[in-house]
Amino acid sequence: MPRVLITGAAGFLGSHLCDRFIKEGYQVVGMDNLLTGNIQNIEHLFPHKDFEYYHHDVSKFVHVSGPLDYILHFASPASPIDYLKMPIQTLKVGALGTHNLLGLAMSKGARILVASTSEVYGDPLVHPQSEDYWGNVNPVGPRGVYDEAKRFLEAITMAYHTFHGLETRIIRIFNTYGPRMRVNDGRVLPAFFSQAIRGEGLTVFGDGSQTRSFCYVDDLVEGIYRLLLSDHDQPVNIGNPSEITILDFAKEVLKLVDNPEAKIIYKDLPIDDPKVRQPDITKAKEILGWTPKVDREEGLQRTYEYFKKVVK
Ligand code: NAD
Ligand code: UDP
C-alpha cells in the first residue's frame, strides 16, 4: 500500500485530499499546524487505521518515520486576508517549508507534488492564462508575500528536479470552492454565503467587474490525483474556465440563498486585486485527460448545503 504525506491536511483542500487518498487505499499521513486549518475537517479520519496525524509547522525541519512514496505540499495560508495578516509565515511556508519537504522527498525517494497558484500570473496581461505566461506580479505589494512565495516554491521545486533528479509535479490551482472552506476566511465565496444566510450586505469590492473562474473541489482533487500519477514534471493549470464577474457571482448567491434581507453593498477594491482570471486548461486536457465536471449551479448548491449547517 503506498504511503502519502499531505501537508495542510486540516485545511480546505488538504482535508479533501486526505479523504480521496484514504478512499484509494493509500496510507495517509496528514500534517498541519492549524494556522488557518480546522481539525474538525479531518476528525472523521482519526479512527481509520490507515490515517495518522502529525501536528507540526513545516517551516521547521520535517521528520516522518517510515517510508513515503508521495508528498503533497499544500500547507500555506491561501486567503488574501490570511496572508495579509501573516505575511512572514506565508513567505516561510512557501520557501522554508517547501525546501524542507523537498529534502524529505529526497531522503525518502518520494515523488512530490507542490501546490502553486494562479496568483503566479499576478494581475495578468494575457487572458486566459496558459502555463507559458510568466505573469505580472508586484513583488513588494501586499499580495507579493503569497505570489512570490509560490513563485519561489515553483523555482526551488524545478531546481530539485533538474539538479537532483527528484520526481516533482507542480499544479497551478485556480479559485476553488466547496464544503469545509472556513466561514470567516475572507475569500469571496464564504463571505457571500455567510452574508446572504445572515441577511447582511454582500460586500462586493470595487464595482464588481473583476472576474474569477470557480472550480468545484471534487474536480480539483481529481486533477491533482491525475497529475501526481502522470509523468509530467512541468506546471499544469487546474481550474474551471467558466468565468464570471464578482457582481454577477454575488447575484447568483443571492438568488440561491433567497433571503429578502440580504443585498449587495460596495467596498473598496483591495490593492493589486487581479482584474481578470481564467485558466487555459488545454494542457490538463491533453496530458491528463482532465476536464471539470461540476458546473457552478451544481457546485454552489452543494456548497450552500454545507454553509447552511455551519453559518451561525
Ligand atoms: P486553507 O487555509 O484551508 O489550508 C491551508 C492549511 O495549511 C491549513 O490547514 C493551515 O493550518 C496549514 N498550514 C499553513 N501553514 C502551515 C505550516 N507552516 N505548517 C503546517 N501547516 C500549515 O487553504 P486551502 O484553500 O486549503 O489551500 C491549500 C493550498 O492550496 C495552499 O498551498 C494554497 O496556496 C493552495 N491554493 C488554494 C487555492 C484555492 O482556491 N483554495 C488556489 C490556489 C492555491
Ligand atoms: N471579493 C469581494 N468581496 C469579498 C471578498 C472578495 O468582492 O468579500 C472579491 C475580491 O476583491 C476578488 C474576488 O472577489 O476580486 C476573489 O477574491 P478571493 O479573496 O476569493 O480570491 P482571490 O482570487 O482574490 O485570491
Image: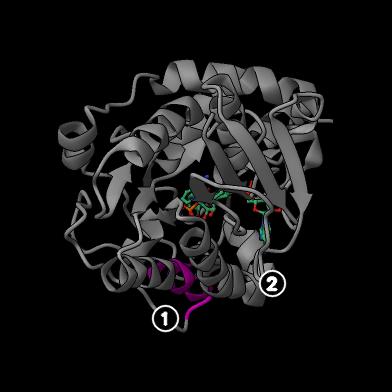
Q: In the rendering, at what x and y percent does residue 209 appear?
A: 37, 48
Q: Which residue is mark 1?
A: 139
For this orientation, the residue located farthest to the right is: 312
Depth check, mark 2 against mark 1: the one in front is: 2
Between 207 and 275, the residue placed more toward the observer is 275
Q: Secondary structure at mark 1?
A: loop
Q: Which residues are magenta?
A: 141-151
Q: Residues within 10 Å of mark 1 (few under 14, many from 20)?
A: some
> Residue shown at 31%/65% (left/top)?
161
Displayed quadrant of residue 294: top left
Q: Residues within 10 Å of mark 2 (few under 14, many from 20)?
A: few
Displayed quadrant of residue 91: bottom right
Q: In the rendering, at what x and y percent does residue 94 appear?
A: 53, 68
Prevailing SS of the magenta stretch: helix
In this rendering, would 227 be left or right of 16?
left
Q: In the rendering, at what x and y percent does residue 131 appear?
A: 21, 55
At label 2, the amino acid type is: Lys
Between 145 and 163, the residue placed more toward the observer is 163
Q: Secondary structure at mark 2?
A: loop
Spatial CA distance of label 2 from label 1 is: 24 Å
The colouring scheme, among rainbow, by chain, secondary structure or one colour, is: one colour
Do callouts 2 and 1 mark residues in contact (Cβ within 8 Å)? Answer: no
Q: Which residue is mark 2?
A: 60
Precedes in sequence: disc 2 or disc 1: 2
> Residue shown at 29%/74% (left/top)?
163
At label 1, the amino acid type is: Pro
